[in-house]
Amino acid sequence: MTRTHTARAELSARRRPAMPRWVWPWLLLLPTFLAIGAVAFWPILEGLRLSLTNTSLITRQSDFVGLENYTGLLSDARFWNAWGHTVWFTFASTLLETLIGLGMALVLYERFACRGLVRAAMLVPWAMPTVVTSKMFGWLFDGQNGVVNWLLMNLGIIDAKINWYGNPDTALTTLIIADVWKTAPFMALLLLTGLQTIPKSLTEAARMDGARGWTVFWSIRLPLLMPTLLIAGLFRALDAFRVFDLVYVLTGGGPADSTETLSTLAYKELFSTLEFGYGSTVSTAMFITEAILAGILCLWLVRTIRRVS
Amino acid sequence: MTIKTPHSGGRPGPAHVTQLDRRAFLSTGAAGLGAAALGLPTRARAAGRKQISFATASFFGSETFGDLVDSFNESQDRVMVDYIELPPPSSSTEVYQGLVQQLARGNGTPDVFSQDVIWIAGFAAAGWALPLDEFVDAEMTSKYFEGTLSACKWDGKLTALPWFMDTGMMYYRKDLLDQYGEAVPSTWAEMARIGKAAMEAGDTEFGFLWQGKQAEVLVCDAVEAIASNGGAILADDGRSARIGESAAVEAIQFLYDTINEMKISPSDVLSWDEEPSRQPFTAGKSMFLRNWSYVWPIAQDPSVSEIVGKVGAGPLPHFDGGKSASTLGGYQLGLNANTKERDAAWEFMSWMSAPEQQKRIALNFGLGPSRPALFDDAELNEKQPFMATLRPVFTGATPRPVTPEYAKVTLALQSGISKALVNGEVEKEMTALSGQLDKIVG
């Protein structure tokens, strides 16, 4: 047995020089390239191609139309309406989730009784499927029987039931609240790991020099946490940008298009009207906006990391 | 005649059988045809029969449509139908996508399919549904409800065969009407007056519940209001919009007023679809409710309803000088234009739509027949007494806009009507909507 093994090893070792050295790494990378190409690049390129055609399953056309879809998109009020909602949703929910998540992480970092239990329990909202969260918030914020209205009325904050989802002024805000509830724990988790990487010696030294809690936070923890904070923010922002299930389940984009987002608009174009051409244009526009967003955050991240190290 | 099939190689017999068994599941039509044309043995149970396939959304009752297909297969020895089950009607977007993908392939599978009324025009315009005029005559069509028939037509041709239907209807509190000595209201104004009175007397919290969520159901509610005022969303030829006309504007204004002027509906209806509006009604909180026929059994179930035995149902009210209208829903049968087995497919379709099968569907699924004569059936009336109520409602069944661009039309309607109901600028929004619709269908 052992002998044959060594014999084989010798054989292959002898054979190796026959192949140019540079081939090996590429050969080993090939499966990865193929996999990523098949699931990431090909769909993106296919989406781009479709966005330049008038492909529709209903009219059964599929002709190249150049940039016609894009000029149509730029003058499409529905698109800009959805674009505005999506950008606002992303900004507001990411900001709130970062702030609340940071607060949660700072609390969970300290030692207290049952800390392990609280850390685990905190993740429950994040573990729930979004559809379940959506249905739950649907009931919480129900205009007639919702517990939120009941609480606010009993506390004397409002004197008439608020119609959270039926009013264009409050519908998007309610969706943001639901999203914050669901994903703030995720931010807290990322930031907690970030906090744990900050050397204890630094904070201990600062305290020895007489620094108070706030000073320790502003001068030591926050600057060192900044890279983690930005990476977590980037993750969240990209995720929030493609919000779909909350809107789809709770409002369907209404009332009066006040909660329409790019994802729901693209879904309607692609799968309700089966206009694959124009629908792909909407998703490509989404992709571009998201790439710009990611680009800005990445630049900021790189600069922060350089400053910290 | 040359037919390309995956089985045309010279493989020995038994291999064909197993191959076909597997294939038949995926592409019954083509495989079945290939085998039949080449005279090869097909499945043992299908020996010597023409093989076709039938795709339908899955409805549930005390049996499934698969059971009906089995009955057909057992009832004769000429045609063998394979049943392709699509998602339930609650996922109608997925059913639609599934059908479009199969029909667009143009390979004749499924030979027969069932379709929501709103897809009929689109399928016909795309050339996927075969006009049925060569199979039917006036005597045959006269046996169906008129509204259903007109929804089954595209460009003057019958492209779908009526199967079963559902429509919007008015549910009311029979006990309270008796208490006030009022008759069932026939106009919207009377309805609003009685609804208001019930609220003021403290008998109910709301007067009238309907569905204003920016979704398909909003279009259904709007069609009923507009048609009951003699208006329409699109012109008869489906090529121009009529929603900017005063009849339509008045109707939408009425819906807006139920919330803001008469205050008989809570503003929550703007985010409600069917179920959220049904719950307060069966909890005894509303005088009137506009909804579909599924509400009836729920309202009569003591475990979920506070109003068992206190409910009545009937046609929706209308405006002065108008006629009651109820939005037509339900699934109708279509014949794939690319089918290779026209006659076999038609035989199956007409069997499905025949009185016996419609009655069986009414009894076992609770779905309304599209043949008025069935409503006189003693057994049906005894086992499903609610069906008798449906006859006058079905008579007023009104199709939603008949256009191949329905998918775009409905999205524009949902957005435009929702805006009007929120901001109250009904005339302005309807004019804008009318312009949009003209662009889509023109």
Image (cartoon, helix red, strand yellow):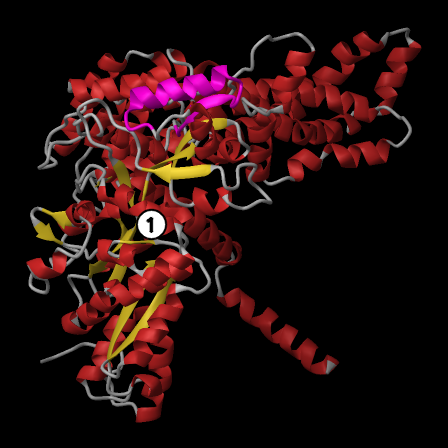
Give the residue type that dot 1 points to.
Ala
Residue linked to disc 1: B388
In magenta, the rendered stretch is B185-211
Q: Is residue B177 above or below residue A46?
A: above
SS type, badge 1: helix
Residue in the picture at 21% in, 83% down: B36
Q: Where's residue B245, x and y in %?
A: 15, 20
Would residue B203 be counted in the magenta stretch?
yes
**The C terminus of chain A: image quadrant:** top right
Residue in the picture at 75% in, 10% down: A218
In the visual, does B232 lie left or right of A101?
A: left
Image quadrant assignment for residue B415: top left
Q: Where's residue A5, x and y in %?
A: 68, 77
Total numbered circles: 1
Q: Is residue A184 above or below residue B257?
A: below
**Label 1 marks which chain's residue?**
B
Viewer-side residue, A140 vs A191: A140
Viewer-side residue, A230 vs A239: A239
Report whether residue B326 is seen.
yes
Would residue B398 be counted in the magenta stretch?
no
Q: Where's residue A86, x and y in %?
A: 44, 23
**The N terminus of chain A: image quadrant:** bottom right
In the visual, does B418 lie left or right of B128?
A: right
In the visual, does A197 lie left or right of A92?
A: right
Residue in the picture at 28% in, 21% down: B252
Viewer-side residue, A32 vs B232: B232
